[in-house]
Amino acid sequence: MIHPESAPEAAATAHEIRNEFVLQAEGEVVLRDPATVNQNIATGEIEITVDTLRIVSRSTPLPFQLDEENVDETIRLRYRWLDLRTERMQRNLRLSHTIIAAIRRRMDELGFVDLWTPSMTKGTPEGARDFLVPVRLQPGRFFALAQSPQLFKQLSQIGGLDRYYQIATCWRDEDLRADRQFEFRQLDVEMSFVEREDVLDVLERAVVASFEALGREPPARPFTRVSWHEADLRYGSDKPDLRFGLEIRDATEVTRGSQFGVFANAPAVRFLVAPRAFSRAELARLEGIAKEWGAKGLAYLVRDESGEVRSPIAKFLSEQELAAFASDPGTTVLFAADEPRTVSRVLGGLRTHLGRELDLADTTRDAFLWILDFPLFELDEETGRWTFVHHPFTGVKPGQEHLVEADPGACISQAYDLVWNGIELGSGSIRIHDQELQRAVFRSMGMGEEEARAKFGFLLEALEMGAPPHGGFAMGIERFVMLMAGEPDIRQILAFPKVASGSDPLTGAPTPYPAAALKELGIQSIVPSDQA
Ligand code: ASP
């Protein structure tokens, strides 16, 4: 508050003030007149009766106003230093700090050692492409940026550091999405002489600590546990949102010998009952979605409010079948009939879609869920070879070691995922600590002895020198913070994120480098300079 009569100079200076100027004022801090108290701001009860006023720093006209809504995101990121001043970004970055600090405290309390591992290393197989770093001292050779500290954390266990953790930065060259950046952080954990439950317990405690630090009701422990197989059958997904039911049911048995050939001939027939009698137009749209997930069509039975059944296939179905598909008035039974994998994918996709479209989730709940017992291998459709589902260091269910080479597809792994409200937060496993078994896994993936030695010789050697049983986990920090902040994408909780094209609007990176600089690294660009 400047009174021109008592502070004429300050009043004159005040005329120059524009948005986002930095000011220094001296004067008396006084209570505001009750009529001017503003409860909406932290300093709303006081003001300064200014004696002297100085403009410390000026601002050019702003590219956007801080209280403006729907500012184009590229502009926000281009001028991120301004955007960071908004209430939203201030809240999100502080929330992120609170969570990370709470996790660090909890890990410390639990006796974990924060160990830093190299970013520049050798390719780590986490299923993405590597970012490469050329090395001036060794032209033609490259480091890979760590996709995760996986092998270092395992080696730390062989090194006797029986409780490792790190808020580790990981680099993965993948297409950017709402919940994915090239570089991200994980709460990365590894422990020795543990069983699965020990690892899950630590992660649950870290999650609960984060809720508590934010003053929120933490999810009840232990979190729900569901096997991968069961999740696949009941939800058609390895990351189901359990805030709503809409469970998939099996109809394979009851449709054997059906008059409806599509059912009779399909290896698997399953259905879900949507709580709504869909119109023809809605069903056509759902069919389109089912087809995107790989269905050839979408069979249905609509039971309208009066209980009447509307369906082109009803006339082919036996009484027994109709009884199995009986549903309440005002519902629709949606079927998928195909290979089990396709059926899961289609119904899982429809379940997720309907959950969102019909607003089925109870948003007052937090559904944390562990998915256990993933398969160890899956068939790579491109190469026709077995490949890992998690990573090749994941242990096999005890007693199934002999199946690793004899019947890879039948092997159940010791891997587990953590899911929150339908979003995967992270994964981990009990590892292989026996070098023979590790070699067998490599062989099953078609990796010869020589290749295994070239890529992972150091691990195999370490496993030969007294490796303790060990296991761990990694949880995506940004995804976790994003969900805690109720934000739709992780750019809103990162100070300086990149946009979908993979660039940083603020610095303009990535940029081309002069040929001379590349030459020094033993690199020649094949991209024409006008296209780089
Ligand atoms: N390295 C794994 C990942 O980044 C996590 C783990 O297995 O601990 O997903």
Image (cartoon, grey):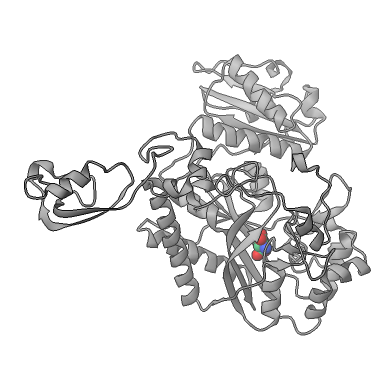
Frontmost residue, 180 versus 325: 180
Above or below — where is 42 with respect to 116? above
Frontmost residue, 518 versus 209: 518
Position of 319 compared to 106: left or right? right
- Residue located 44% across and 41% down the image: 362
Q: Is residue 253 visible?
A: no
Q: Quadrant of ligand 1?
A: bottom right
Position of 51 compared to 85: left or right? left
Frontmost residue, 400 versus 450: 450
Frontmost residue, 425 versus 29: 29
Residue 147: give x, y in percent of width and height: 69, 60
Above or below — where is 115 with respect to 304? below
Position of 299 compared to 5: left or right? right
Which quarter of the rendering shows the C terminus?
top right
Residue 518 position by quadrant: bottom right
Q: Is residue 252 visible?
A: yes
Position of 300 compared to 144: left or right? left
- Residue located 38% across and 51% down the image: 91
Residue 361: give x, y in percent of width and height: 48, 39
- Residue located 66% across and 58% down the image: 171
Residue 351: give x, y in percent of width and height: 60, 35
Above or below — where is 145 with respect to 509? below
Q: How many marks?
A: 0
Residue 313: give x, y in percent of width and height: 71, 18
